Amino acid sequence: MRYLIELYLKYRFWLIFILLEVVSMVTLVKFNKYQGSVYFTTANTVSGAWYSFTSGISSFFDMQAENERLEHENEMLRKRLNDLRSGMKEEDNTVDMLTEKNRNLRDYRFISAHVINATLNRANNVLTIDRGEDDGVKESAGVVCSSGVVGIVYKTSAHYAMVVPLINEKSIVSCKVDIDSTRVFGTLQWQMGSPQFSFLNDIPRHEVVKEGMEVETNGFSDIFPENIPVGKVTKVDDSSDGLSYSLTVKLYTDFAKLRNVSVIADYTRSERKLLEEKVDSMINDK
Amino acid sequence: MLAILFVQIVICNNIHVFGYAPPVLLAYLTMKFHRGSSRESLLVWGFIIGLIFDIFSNTMGKGMAACTLLGMLQPYLLGLFSPTESVDMLVPSFKTLGFDRYIYYVIASLLIFHFFFYLLEDFSFRHPKILLTGTFVSTLMAVLFVILADVITPKDKYVD
């Protein structure tokens, strides 16, 4: 304490000088806008440089932990890259396969999407995909995957769309079975039960339908083009009224593992609809 | 002191030569402390004089800092320009220091004062031309006022 007093007495002039100058400077910065802003800007620059310097030192000592963290992150990113690559391949395959099968598909555009939510065990299952109106997805557009038909877009928002899949009791898709050179048409409708099987109804009894026959879209609707694979006939049964056959169809699409899908954007749909409406109105006028 | 304060507020604060800030005549009071004054009291008086100037000129902090600096340097400057064989309680003036020495003393003091004052005004070295021109113009004006003040004020008490 005595030492401190001696120290003060010895240097009191300079201490008072520094104190008074500090008070003056604080007053200057506090009461003058320009000086205040210059001070805070400079102080920020200085403190920024200081933090940068200290963080440089600390990061040097943290380098080993940082390396381990980066290695872990690299590993995770590599895995993600592989997943994406395989996903892209799958999508390319969808388009290639469908285009090869059907030349009419040249008029269509495919919008790639991912299934982000799906239900399988309800009567009215739905899927949510991560593409919406902003991406060109419209209501009533068909949705397919590399294996075949998935469903129909029911509702859209800006970035998402709800799809009614084949495994929804309200889903009705017009399909055909090629028997020799004859096409037999029916309607595909799912009943609550296994998500792997659906039912093709209204098949005339005089047609000879066998197990293992291919079921494809018939192109009557403007939702799906012709010849998109749907599934394979596994069982032939009589319908409940006994007037037609009801075929059990094993769906090609595995809804439990469904991830990558493509929405069909039909360039000609509006043109076709317009023509049909024109003809209808002409007939009605007559 | 009241007369100087009056001149500072009424006249000097309204002089803007070439658009530069007015001369600070109040620094004159710090310069006129006699030799042998307590150095600490010089600092405190310098601070108070600067505070009074700042209050009336809306330059908070600048006058305080500059006058305190001048108060700190005053004994050294006075020692530099006063003759070796002079009285201990010498009050700087034309008569005590002689015309040349007194003018040099005043110019040196006011140059330092105004340089520091305008440095705080600019708060950077980005405009050295304005800083130096302002310093010289204001110092010149202040020197003229100091000479005038010395001529019209009563004779100093401690003269040889």
Image (cartoon, coloured by chain):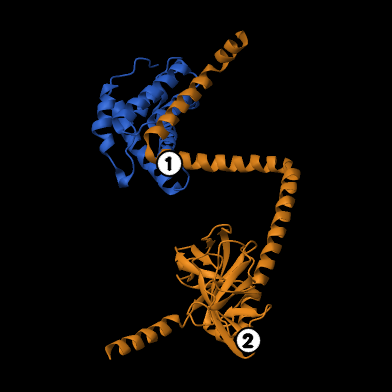
Chain colours: A orange, B blue
Q: Quadrant of residue B63?
A: top left
Work out whether residue A209 or residue A69 is closer to the camera in this orientation and state it: A209
- x, y percentage for residue B131? 42, 44
Camera-nearest label, 1 or 2: 2
In the image as oriented, which residue stretches furthest toward the left? B10
Q: Residue furthest top?
A: A2
Of A242 and B4, the residue lying toward us: A242
Label 2: how many Cα within 10 Å (few below 14, some 14–19, many 20+):
some
Question: Which quadrant: the C terminus of chain B?
Answer: top left
Q: Amino acid at mark 2?
A: Ile
Comparing B105 with B138, the one in front is: B138
On the same chain: label 1 and label 2?
yes
Residue at the spot x=31%, y=33% of the render?
B58
Task: Identify residue type, mark 1.
Answer: Ser
Q: Position of residue A235 (x, y in %)?
A: 65, 73
Q: Are marks 1 and 2 in contact (CB under 8 Å)?
A: no
Report which quarter residue B133 is drawn in.
top left
Residue A24 lies, with reference to residue A70, above or below; the image says above
* Residue placed under numbered mark 1 in the picture: A37
Question: From this viewpoint, is residue B79 visible?
Answer: no
Q: Is residue B42 left or right of residue A208?
A: left
Pointer 1 chain: A
The chain letter for the residue carrying disc 2 is A
Number of residues whose C-alpha sits closer than 10 Å to that of mark 1, classed few (under 14), some (14–19) or many (20 or more): few
Q: Which residue is mark 2?
A: A179
User: Which of these two is toward me, B58 or A146?
Assistant: A146
From the viewer's perspective, is residue B157 above or below residue A202? above
SS under mark 2: strand
